[in-house]
Image (cartoon, rainbow, N blue to C red):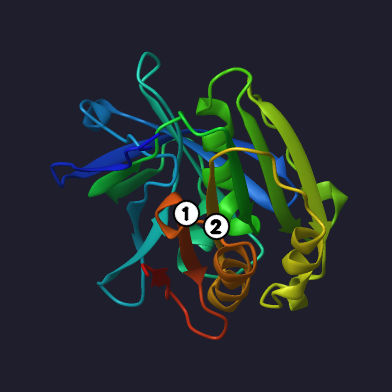
Amino acid sequence: MSHQITRVRHELRRRNLTVNRKEQVTPNMLRIWLGGDDLAGFTSLGADDHVKVFVPGAGEKAEMRDYTPRRYDEAAGELAIDFAIHDAGPATAWAIESAPGDTLEIGGPRGSMVVPTDFDWFLLIGDETALPAIGRRLEELPAGLKVITLAAVTGPEEEQAFDTAADHTAIWVHRPAARAADPEALLEPLRALDLPEGDGFVWIAAEADVVRGVRRHVLEDRGHPLPWSKASGYWIKGKADSTEKFES
C-alpha cells in the first residue's frame, strides 16, 4: 500500500473565544472548553495539529504557546484544549486561574498532517505533553485498528482513560518529573515491545532528547521506514517555549 500522507494548509485566522467550563482530567491535566461565534469555520484535520494560544505576558506583549486542539465539537460549538499544569509557564498560569466567562485568543491551526488509517497498526509514544494528541488520535481511529500507546507520566494518578473503538493496548511508564528528559524511561519498555505484523505508523512526541533517542531506536535498530513515522520535540529541557522538529 502507498499509505498516502497528505498535508493541508488552512486559512490563518485569530479567534477570540470564551471559557465555557473547566474539567480536571487528572491532577496535572486541565481541560478548558472554549466557545463563541468566532469558532465558526474552525478546521483541524490532524490529531497532532496545534493552535497558538495568546495569553497575557510581561508588560503589553502577549505570550504565545502551542497547544493541541484536543476535541472540536462543531455541533455544540465547543473546542477543548488540554493544559499540562506541572510547569509554571504563562499559559499554564492562565489555565489554572481562568474561570467561565474569561476570554482567550487562539490562532490557527496553520496546517494539518493527515495520516490515513489504512495502516495495519499505529504506535504512539510520548510524555504528558503528547497525551492530548494521543488521546485525540485514539478517539478518531476506526474500530478494530491495532494501536499501541507507550506514555510516560509521573504516576498512576496521571494515567488517562481514552474512549476508542480501536484495538488499543496501553503501556504506561511511571517516572518522576525530574527524569522527564531521560530517554531510558521510554526506551526500556520500547526495546521489550513486540510490534504487530504488517505496515505501521509510529508517532513520537516528548522532550527533544527523549524523542531523539526513541526515534533512533525505531528507525535504526528496528528499521522502521522513515516516511511512516513522525517525531516532534514538544519541549526542550532548560529552554522556555522551545520545540524541535525531526524531518529526516
Q: Which residue is mark 1?
A: 229
Where disc 2 sits, the SS reads loop
Amino acid type of disc 2?
A: His
Residue contact between numbered discs 1 and 2, judged by CB atoms under 8 Å: yes
Q: What residue lies at 17% left-to-right and 41% top-to-bottom?
A: 10
Q: Is residue 190 above or below residue 115?
A: below
How would you rate the neighbour count of disc 1 (Cα within 10 Å): few for under 14, some for 14-19, many for 20 or more?
many
Out of 132 and 213, give the one closest to the viewer.
213
Q: For residue 63, say whether it is visible.
A: yes
Q: Is residue 76 above or below residue 119?
A: above
Furthest-bottom residue in this view: 238
Q: What residue lies at 68% left-to-right and 31% top-to-bottom?
A: 162
Q: Which mark is residue 224?
A: 2
Image location of residue 129, percent across then percent down: 58, 58
Q: Is residue 126 above or below residue 105?
A: below
Q: What residue lies at 53% left-to-right and 60% top-to-bottom?
A: 92
In the rendered view, does 194 fall on the left or right side of 22? right
Q: Earlier in the sequence, mark 1 or mark 2?
A: 2
| Distance from the alpha carbon under mark 1 to that under mark 2 | 8 Å
